Image (cartoon, grey):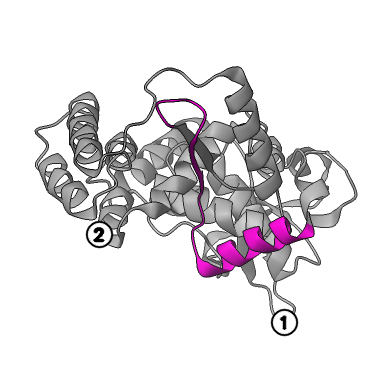
């Protein structure tokens, strides 16, 4: 079950272990003029879908605001900055509201502001996979979180988080198409099956034309990769990984906070250990963990 926003979040940003929902426990619930609120300058979401905002606006007209937004008050003046809830704030404007319910949080530094925004965005189904991957990495790096901890805070499974982060291995042009909605996350994951950048870009162009389902693209990618393996003389075991190997992968992923893949050779006695990193800083973090052991 996915966690509600705020459960476990105080433990993340303060270390107190408090788990009260801020919407319930915070007594600073007020109505604020919408025109006195400005966006979060640390907003991790890069794109907002107009049709999704319109649907939410219609829901607000019919049923009201399901959850208040979270803001901080400026030290000077009577204006506010969003911490979490920009979609609701945008939709409320479209719905024609002049005021919006908000929880005022005090003493919010940039690190906590970022954490609140990231966690909320990650718990929204409409966040595109690339923005989600970037958000996961920011939380892991800035809070030194493991995959298990991140799974607990966001309510997402560890394999889901790992697979999403892997999308950052794709070329920028492919990532851009996922962000703008022209390429689905499923198609992007299928492209990750191909090690050759040249072949991957060829199938990427086919996928953009809309003629390939995710299953079709997976089949094409598998054929391309198998052909490439035969040419290079590399053949991996096609059987399912044993529970021992899966356990080793899981333990390494928890230790390193990143995707780890173990591929066995045909003899099942030799193989390749792949440790994924997503920037030079991330690589340095992983190396530092290994050197401490």
Residue 243: percent from the left, percent from the top? Answer: 60, 19
Q: Is residue 20 visible?
A: yes
Q: Nearer the viewer, residue 133 or 37?
A: 133
Q: Is residue 246 above or below residue 287?
A: above
Q: Which residue is mark 2?
A: 173
Q: Tell me where residue 289 sits by quadrant.
A: bottom right
Q: Nearer the viewer, residue 184 or 193?
A: 193
* Drawn side of residue 259 relative to residue 206, left or right: right
- Name which residue lies at 15% across and 40% down: 207
Label 2: how many Cα within 10 Å (few below 14, some 14–19, many 20+) = few
Q: Tell me where residue 234 sits by quadrant.
A: top left
- Name which residue lies at 50% across and 38% down: 261
Residue 231: percent from the left, percent from the top? Answer: 19, 41
Magenta segment boundaries in residue numbering:
265-292
Q: Which residue is mark 1?
A: 76
Residue 22: percent from the left, percent from the top? Answer: 77, 44
Queried whether the magenta region covers residue 27, the answer comes back as no
Tell me the SS state at disc 2: helix
């Amino acid at each position: 079950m996915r966690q509600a926003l705020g459960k476990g979040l105080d433990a993340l940003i303060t270390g107190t272990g408090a788990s009260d929902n801020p919407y319930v426990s915070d007594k600073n619930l007020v109505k604020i003029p919408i025109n006195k609120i400005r966006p979060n300058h640390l907003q991790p979401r890069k794109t907002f879908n107009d049709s999704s905002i319109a649907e939410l606006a219609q829901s607000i007209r019919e049923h009201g605001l399901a959850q208040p937004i979270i803001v901080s008050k400026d030290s000077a003046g009577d204006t506010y900055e969003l911490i979490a809830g920009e979609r609701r704030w945008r939709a409320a404007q479209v719905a024609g509201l002049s005021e919006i319910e908000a929880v005022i949080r005090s003493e919010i530094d940039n690190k906590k502001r970022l954490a609140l925004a990231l966690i909320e965005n990650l718990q929204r189904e409409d966040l595109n996979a690339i923005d989600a991957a970037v958000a996961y990495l920011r939380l892991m790096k800035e809070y030194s979180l493991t995959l298990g901890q991140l799974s607990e805070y966001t309510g997402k499974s560890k394999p889901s988080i790992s697979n999403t982060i892997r999308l950052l291995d794709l070329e920028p042009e492919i990532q851009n198409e996922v962000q703008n909605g022209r390429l689905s996350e499923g198609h992007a994951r299928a492209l990750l099956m191909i090690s050759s950048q040249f072949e991957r870009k060829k199938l990427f162009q086919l996928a953009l034309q809309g003629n390939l389902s995710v299953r079709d693209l997976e089949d094409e990618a598998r054929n391309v990769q198998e052909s490439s393996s035969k040419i290079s003389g590399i053949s991996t075991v096609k059987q399912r990984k044993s529970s021992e190997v899966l356990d080793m992968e899981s333990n390494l992923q928890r230790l390193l906070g990143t995707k780890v893949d173990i591929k066995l050779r045909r003899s099942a006695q030799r193989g390749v250990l792949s440790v994924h990193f997503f920037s030079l800083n991330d690589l340095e973090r992983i190396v530092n963990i290994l050197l401490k052991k």
